[in-house]
Image (tube, helix red, strand yellow):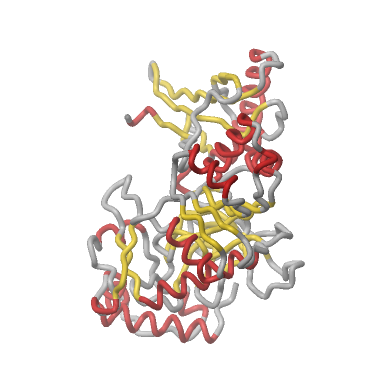
Amino acid sequence: MQISELQISQVNKQIKALIKAGSFYGRKLEDAGIQSVSSQEDFEKLPFSEKNDLREAYPLGLMTAPEEDIVRIHSSSGTTGLPVIIPYTAKDVEDWAVMFARCYETAGITNKDRIQITPGYGLWTAGIGFQAGAEKLGAMVIPMGPGNTDKQLQMMTDMKSTVICATSSYALLLAEEIEKRGIKDKICLKKGVIGSERWGEKMRQRIRDELGIELYDIYGLTEVYGPGIGINCSYETGMHYWDDYLYIEIVDPVTLKPVPDGELGEIVITTLVKEGAPLIRYRTHDLSRIIPGICPCGSRFPRLDIIMGRTDDMMKIKGVNVFPSQIEEILREFPEVSSEYQIRISHLDGRDTMRLYVETNGRVDFLDLAKRIAGTVKSRIGFTPLVKVVELGLLPRSEKKSKRVIDERYE
């Protein structure tokens, strides 16, 4: 995507604010002697920003607006180091709600819907983002938060919720519970808005079939408002993102050079109007591509493909680079396995070993299935995993995000 003149002028306002605030990025710009940009070429010379930069700014080094204008903070989980603290002004909070309401509208959700919100509230951006967007839309919110599946299902049936907002892992857990309890005829759900983790086609199909609902991928990250910066429409030809608030580039993760529309690469985001903690050329490490052309729905907003994985998802096993999405692609070819899988990597007797756990029903030959899956991984990826087939429902389910890869080499 080419940057527009309006977007360049918005970037220049952000540059000015960052330099004035003396933030880490303002200092980067000053060191590079950059005061403004006037073209695509200029913009692509701007330095990138990374999560580590944001961590090093802990606690409030990212604050670009005056403190009296900051009304809220949110934070990333901080599971791999210091958390990232993102300050928001009242305008940032309002802009985020507007974007989120736009997501609901794109999914065909209206003020007559009843929206049950299961992601967490608090420092995490998810719950409160889903709620603010629904309130902006004028829909009825059922703000459940995470966990307590009995209560979730009670409220879902009694309140006749029509929309469920969840991680894909929790949507699957709810679908399995509804099936188990035989209460599908009491459920009024029509749509699911699913975010916060990448999910494969097999899982999507199971949730869609078991709940009998339309599913929508919502995109976002804490550092850039939170969920709600993009969503797919009913044509399912990618996620529309809001280019009046964000400029998105796709870059080659190795060379860091922008790639043409349609090519896979890393999503890099620039916030155009954010006040509390603007970001320029922020490397998300999410892998996707910009889909060229106009969507059949007629929306003018550009599209990103679904998230294919992350540059930091890559596992190195026996000298071979592997992404979880490659394993998912292979498992899709085996109709007898469920959407759930787990990869465990260990180092035994001087060599790496990958164990792949998959679920199936009790009507297949477990040994034969394991052998066929191992053979397909060997022929496609180049090494033979130890495949362990288990009964449906034995792998752990999660109310948050599922942990698909457990690397025991570094534990």
Report the quarter where the C terminus lies.
top left
User: Residue 306: where, in percent of width, then height?
Assistant: 61, 54
Name the residue at the right extreme: 296
Query: From the viewer's perspective, is 305 left or right of 355?
Result: right
Query: From the viewer's perspective, is 6 left or right of 121?
Result: right
User: Residue 200: where, in percent of width, then height?
Assistant: 62, 42
Above or below for 340 versus 35:
above
At x 57%, y 25%, the residue is 393
In this view, the residue in front, 189 or 411, is: 189
Q: Is residue 296 visible?
A: yes
Query: From the viewer's perspective, is 305 left or right of 89?
Result: right
Above or below for 8 versus 304:
below
In this view, the residue in front, 99 or 351, is: 99
User: Residue 371: where, in percent of width, then height?
Assistant: 65, 17
Q: Is residue 261 visible?
A: no
Above or below for 362 versus 253:
above
Quarter-wise, where is residue 242 in the image?
bottom right
User: Residue 389: where, in percent of width, then height?
Assistant: 59, 19
